[in-house]
Amino acid sequence: MLIDSQAVRYSRGGLFPVVWMGDMHIAADGSIIAGIYPGFMQDQQGKVDASGITFYRSVDKGHSWTVQGRIPYQPDTIKDLNGNKRLALGFTEPGFEILKDGSFLCIMRTTDGLGNSPMYASRSTDLGATWSKPTVITPFGVLPRVLQLKNGVIVLSAGRPGVQLRFSTDPQGMNWTDPLEMLPYEGERPAVTCGYTGLLATGPDRFLL
């Protein structure tokens, strides 16, 4: 059961989908936190803005979910020139990790159909109830995957074009290395890669991509 009085659903092709795409993690208090998109919501004036990311919390092993917090779509129109042109999907495909200090890190794709668009990052220090203003951290990328290794290093993988790895030794995950190109993408065809990756830790300082 999903309890969210502001949630707005949509229809497509005569169907009424319920999309729940994102990551789930178990918080320090044992509750389950899910960060998902699309996060359409109706504001006090009845207006529906571009989708943000919604965080839900379950204290009964996933049987019911209540709103924990939201990251509303807030584009940086200086670093993201198409930011004000996204009228429906704003932030999409969130990568969500609970860091060693208990803070939450969320990295989000943007989609505009006008070419490569940036990824944003936001943090929460109160179990996802409130979030920092999203900031641009990469010029492009889809389906960001975020993993903190036991040695403290945070790994970020994303793609399209190609596939890139980035690393952060910043405990807050807001400062990243230049990308390590895992696949060449000059003249890339869609068949080369969709850019959708996955990360799996295999030791305190090792992982699989």
Image (cartoon, grey):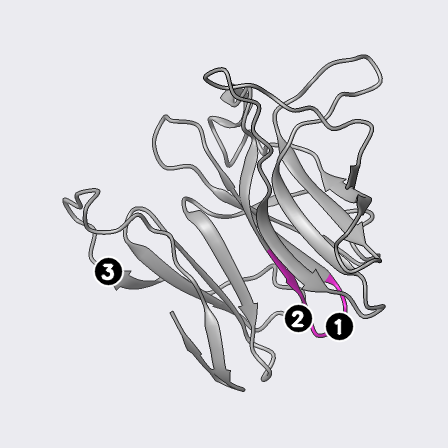
Disc 1 to disc 2, how far (Cα)? 8 Å
The magenta-colored residue range is 96-103
Q: Nearer the viewer, residue 138 or 16?
A: 16
Height in image: 43 above or below 45? below
- Mark-to-mark CA distance, 3 and 2: 28 Å
Question: Is 146 displayed left or right of 125 in the figure?
Answer: left
In space, the residues marked 3 and 1 are separated at their CA atoms by 33 Å
Badge 2: few (under 14), some or many (20 or more) residues near its Cα, within 10 Å?
A: some
Q: Is residue 7 left or right of residue 151?
A: right
Q: Residue placed at 61% from the left, 24% from the top?
A: 50
Q: Residue at x 81, y 70 (%)?
A: 28
Q: Would you say 164 lies left or right of 123 here?
A: left
Determine which residue is flagged by label 1. 101
Marks 3,1: beta carbons within 8 A: no
Question: What is the quadrant of the N terminus in the image?
Answer: top right
Q: Earlier in the sequence, mark 3 or mark 2?
A: 2
What is the magenta segment's predominant secondary structure? loop
Tag in front: 3 or 2: 3
Vertical position of residue 113 compared to residue 62: above or below: above
